[in-house]
Amino acid sequence: MHRLFLALTVLVLLHMPGGSRAAEEIDRLLAAVNRKVITEGDLRLARNLNVLVGFGRMTPPGSRAEEIDQLINRELLRQELEHFPLQPEDQSRADQRMEELKQGYAEIGGITYVLRGLGLQETEIETYLALQVAMMRFIEVRFRPFVGVTEAEIEEYYRTQLEPKLRESGSRIPPLEEVSKQIEGHLMDSKVSREMDAWIQNLRQHSEIELFEERRLTPVETAR
């Protein structure tokens, strides 16, 4: 079943829209972030890399405007990481992730075969993985130490969120003590995510961002 899933994934990847039309659009400008351009090719590359590292599990990307916004946010973060050099342990984690990908695709011809089908180079996936790892470490260092979760918050989540969901589904309701750590981790991740989103929005407001294709502006962008 696992082999079949991967084989079907590769077939999907190899038949994704491409060809001459994609080649014509590769240099089409979508945006510029502090004078660093983002092109149609960057958008397609991001889509393919996400499919590759997810072993074919494709989540709905949202609208095209949302995808471009995600690329803008990633570019802003990448620029910030220029002052946050890659550490040996980061490279080790990236190498480990690359090895996991190679092992995962080994039974259907290897990662080289999949990369060729997507029109990617191994260096592109290596760079992508290194950036992912560096971003995760930046988030851990920049935000997590300043976020806390109280016992009251854990109890409120248990009472107002977890208990009702489990009761509705007919599942066993564990005592609070049994799931306290899991709830704490969930609440911590949510808070870190909100802090990160707020930081990105502030960064956007103080950055030079240009959009080169028409789209509906968000309320935040309209107010700028």
Image (cartoon, helix red, strand yellow):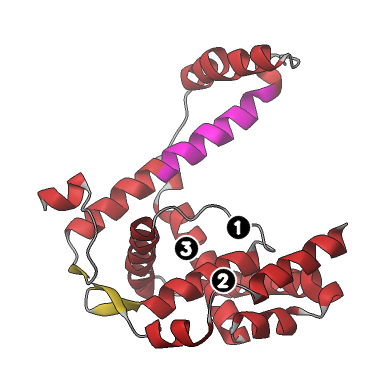
Among numbered discs 1 and 2, the one appearing first in the sequence: 2
Q: Position of residue 86 (x, y in %)?
A: 49, 74
Task: For the N terminus, give its image quadrant.
Answer: bottom right
* Location of mark 1 (residue): 58
Q: Given this view, does label 3 or label 1 mark the residue nearer the observer?
A: 1
Judged left or right of residue 30, residue 208 is: left
Residue 90 visible from this viewpoint = yes
Judged left or right of residue 114, residue 37 is: left
User: Which amino acid type is shown beneath numbered disc 2?
Assistant: Leu
Task: Name the residue located 67 percent from the left edge and 11 percent from the top edge.
Answer: 167
Q: How dense is the environment of label 1, judged by Cα within 10 Å: few (below 14), some, or many (20 and up)?
A: few
Magenta span of residues: 179-193
Q: Is residue 146 above or below residue 153?
A: below
* Location of mark 2 (residue): 49
User: Which amino acid type is shown beneath numbered disc 1?
Assistant: Met
* Label disc, if present, on residue 141 of the rendered structure: none
* Location of mark 3 (residue): 135
Q: Given this view, does label 2 or label 3 mark the residue nearer the observer?
A: 2
Residue nearest the observer in this picture, 5 or 71: 5
User: Residue 54 appears in which quarter of the rendering?
Assistant: bottom right
Q: Determine whether the residue tagged by mark 3 lies in a helix, strand or loop.
A: helix
Judged left or right of residue 124, residue 28 is: left
